[in-house]
């Protein structure tokens, strides 16, 4: 099998997905901090606003190339801003964060598969 590389479009998409994965780690950390507060029956304070603040640029970043993932991020932002029962909101945030991480990982594999080109031998 000849050696392969990613084309430039694939490299840009992988860069976007890598940045998205880092942002999702931040969101995951905020959601888990919120979980600690909910479990201790303390008020969550500004954590939902922090989640929204971190997720909003992520949505814009993904909208151009990965609109399905961006739509899920929009849903996460809506849930974070919702009032009501903290435990229900926390469960929804956890589920969406896990879904987003999975979608990013699957998209990375798909980009690698679709944008791999053989390296032309020099000569």
Image (cartoon, rainbow, N blue to C red):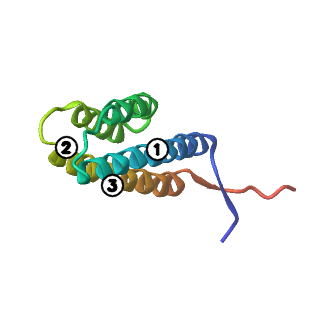
Picture coordinates of residue 24 (x, y %)? 43, 45
Query: Mark 1 = which residue?
Result: 26
Tag shown at residue 89 = 2
Between marks 3 and 1, how big is the CA–CA gap?
A: 13 Å
Picture coordinates of residue 70 (x, y %)? 35, 36
Query: Mark 3 = which residue?
Result: 98
| Up/down of 84 relative to 7, above or below | above
Quarter of image, res 80: top left
| x 39%, y 49%: residue | 28
Q: Quadrant of the N terminus?
A: bottom right
Extreme right residue here?
123
Give the mark, 3 or 2, whose residue is nearer the N terminus.
2
Instruction: Check contact, mark 3 vs mark 1: CB within 8 A.
Output: no
Give the mark, 3 or 1, whose residue is nearer the N terminus.
1
Check disc 1: other Cα within 10 Å, few if <14, some if 14-19, many if 20+.
some
Tag shown at residue 73 = none
Extreme bottom residue here?
1
The reply, left or right, for residue 29 in relation to residue 44 is right
Residue 50 versus residue 102: which sits nearer the camera?
50
Picture coordinates of residue 15 (x, y %)? 58, 42
Picture coordinates of residue 51 (x, y %)? 36, 36
């Amino acid at each position: 099998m000849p050696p392969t590389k990613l084309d430039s479009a694939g490299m840009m998409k992988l860069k976007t997905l890598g940045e998205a994965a880092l942002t999702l780690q931040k969101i995951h950390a905020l959601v888990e901090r919120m979980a600690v507060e909910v479990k201790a029956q303390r008020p969550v304070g500004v954590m939902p606003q922090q989640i929204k603040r971190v997720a909003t640029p992520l949505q814009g970043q993904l909208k151009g190339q990965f609109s399905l993932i961006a739509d899920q991020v929009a849903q996460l932002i809506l849930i974070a801003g919702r009032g009501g029962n903290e435990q229900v909101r926390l469960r929804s945030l956890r589920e969406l964060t896990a879904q987003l991480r999975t979608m990013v990982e699957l998209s990375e594999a798909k980009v690698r598969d679709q944008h791999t080109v053989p390296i032309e031998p020099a000569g």
